[in-house]
């Protein structure tokens, strides 16, 4: 929802307790909404430019190691500038709670207009199983204030799951340990709108299978076959970690993909399909651990699910490939999957063990042709005698999936890219696609959390009709943000 803006820039100060964050935040109240074309879902202050969320879950705040913080850099016609930012931690004025060692605030982030005021809000979760999430509210002056969500600190996910036009929030409680068997996990579905007092329109427990168990219902198509119906629900036993949201069956309701523990050391990705009551049934999703993102790769109007090698947790020993499960009216199916690695014809580079293709994944239309591109981190890429220096690739979407033709692969040694590639940088740890300069093309943000002794850094690459370019690329690190540096791990996740 666009709103008229004045041409002033308001100076906001966020002064945090000694030893924590002490910074001045510039949040534009200013730029006219007609100045940019960014998707509203990426825009916290409604000025038409996407804003970039860079988490630093390892950051020391108020002398508490790994308390964590999040940096939001506001977009403009020139892209993001680390001087125009908002630093958010548990020590930020207006944010409930206090900085706690090893809480890793910022491990999870999601965003959406939760209160229906036309400004996108940010939800920040914690890595600590006992932590909570916080909603930071969007406004004309940027993100401000906070509402605590006690007990639900793990992987919050925002989306319109019931298709009523308001944004809902799926919340996961942390689980201390898993053992050999699946154990219960508290979850909650908060239907929007959600007030700033933390009151949803209604609630439900979306992991209660009695609400969606079975072979289909009157609210949607029945499962295609018995195996698909049984394998889907039985695979969703908990505990679970939300990964991504999108409409993978084209019914106008968002679906949620997440990592689920089946017991006996077995993990699997699953999906719950949105329905009028919240969710109507569960099913299969590709991949196991590692990165996962959702977007319409083949341009058929239905979102697809893309999974990758990820964080080197052993998945590559079984299947080092990126997988795209194409959405359809009956949802996801193992029969509609494209699998590929760097041997894909036209894909620049070569497939090698330990490359971690898909260490991060972002899926969105960069070129404006109606089909999403797929950005892939390759954080284990070796080159120039440097081990695990890392790179990223951008692959074009087509009507039949991604193609290697026209692929772009860049690293810190590429012309016009700030910085120098070094052994162990793992460039490509995090990535996001958002229109940071408001020109109608999404730009690519890529991080290296290992940069500068794990302080971390974030790069941005302008997007255009041909993809992304290193010309005009920028980089920033915690020092540029006047934020805590020591092992901050800035840039993972990026949103």
Image: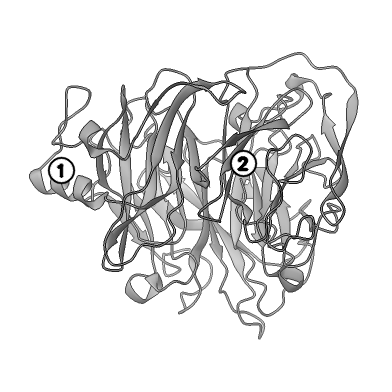
Give residue 393's mark: none
Which of the two discs, 1 and 2, labels the residue nearer the N terminus? 1
Q: Is 367 placed left or right of 208 in the picture?
A: right
| Image: 157 above or below 57 | above
Residue 466 appears in the figure: no
Give residue 465's mark: 2
Residue 262 percent across, percent down from the top left: 27, 59
| Image: 290 above or below 351 | above
- Name the outermost residue toward the top: 4
- Name the outermost residue toward the left: 226
Residue 286 percent across, percent down from the top left: 32, 54
| Image: 280 above or below 420 | above
- How many C-alpha atoms fall within 10 Å of the one at disc 2: few (<14), some, or many (≥20)? few
Residue 238 appears in the figure: yes
Residue 116 percent across, percent down from the top left: 57, 18
Say which of 245 and 78 sits in front.
Answer: 245
Quarter of the image with the N terminus is top right
Where does label 1 land, which residue? 229
Residue 391 percent across, percent down from the top left: 61, 67
Q: CA distance from mark 1 to mark 2?
A: 41 Å
User: Residue visible at 65% across and 30% down?
Assistant: 38
Say which of 307 and 373 sits in front.
Answer: 307
User: Residue visible at 9% across and 44% down?
Assistant: 226
Report if the CB atoms under discs 1 and 2 are less than 8 Å apart. Answer: no
Q: Secondary structure at mark 1?
A: helix
Q: Secondary structure at mark 2?
A: loop
Say which of 47 and 381 sits in front.
Answer: 47
């Amino acid at each position: 929802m666009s709103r008229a803006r004045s041409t002033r820039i308001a100076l906001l100060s966020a002064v945090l307790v000694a030893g924590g964050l002490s910074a001045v935040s510039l949040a534009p109240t200013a730029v006219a909404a007609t100045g940019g074309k960014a998707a509203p879902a990426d825009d916290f202050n409604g000025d038409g430019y996407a804003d970039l969320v860079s988490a630093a879950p390892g950051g020391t705040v108020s002398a508490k190691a790994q308390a964590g913080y999040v940096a939001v850099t506001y977009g403009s016609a020139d892209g993001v500038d680390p001087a125009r930012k908002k630093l958010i931690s548990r020590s930020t004025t207006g944010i409930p709670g206090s900085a706690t060692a090893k809480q890793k605030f910022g491990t999870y982030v999601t965003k959406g207009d939760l209160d229906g005021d036309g400004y996108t809000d940010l939800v920040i979760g914690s890595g600590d199983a006992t932590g909570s999430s916080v909603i930071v509210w969007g406004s004309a002056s940027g993100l401000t204030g906070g509402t605590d969500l006690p007990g639900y600190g793990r992987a919050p996910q925002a989306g319109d799951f019931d298709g009523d036009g308001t944004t809902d929030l799926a919340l996961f409680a942390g689980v201390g340990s898993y053992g050999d068997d699946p154990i219960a996990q508290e979850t909650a579905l908060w239907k929007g709108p959600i007030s700033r007092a933390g009151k949803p329109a209604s609630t439900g427990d979306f992991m209660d299978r009695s609400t969606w168990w079975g072979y289909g219902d009157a609210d949607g198509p029945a499962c295609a076959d018995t195996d698909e119906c049984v394998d889907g629900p039985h695979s969703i036993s908990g505990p679970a970690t939300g990964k991504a949201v999108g409409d993978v069956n084209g019914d106008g309701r968002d679906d949620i993909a997440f990592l689920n523990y089946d017991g006996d050391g077995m993990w699997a990705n699953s999906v719950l399909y949105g329905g009028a009551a919240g969710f109507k049934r569960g099913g299969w999703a590709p991949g196991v651990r590692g990165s996962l993102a959702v977007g319409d790769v083949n341009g058929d109007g239905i979102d697809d699910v893309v999974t990758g090698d990820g964080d080197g947790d052993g998945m590559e020993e079984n299947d080092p490939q990126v997988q795209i499960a194409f959405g359809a009216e009956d949802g996801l199916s193992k029969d509609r999957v494209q699998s590929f690695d760097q041997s894909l014809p036209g894909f620049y580079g070569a497939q090698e063990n330990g490359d971690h293709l898909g260490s991060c994944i972002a899926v969105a239309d960069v070129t404006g042709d109606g089909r999403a591109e797929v950005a892939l981190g390759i954080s284990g890429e070796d080159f120039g005698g440097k081990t695990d220096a890392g790179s990223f690739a951008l692959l074009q979407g087509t009507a039949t999936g991604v193609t290697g033709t026209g692929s772009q692969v860049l690293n810190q040694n590429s012309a016009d890219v700030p910085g120098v590639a070094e052994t162990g940088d793992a460039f490509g740890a995090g990535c996001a696609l958002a229109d940071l300069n408001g020109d109608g093309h999404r730009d690519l943000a890529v991080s290296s959390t290992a940069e500068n002794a794990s302080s971390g850094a974030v790069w941005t690459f302008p997007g255009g009709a041909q993809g992304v370019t290193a010309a005009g690329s920028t980089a920033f690190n915690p020092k540029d943000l006047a934020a805590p540096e020591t092992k901050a791990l800035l840039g993972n996740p990026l949103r």
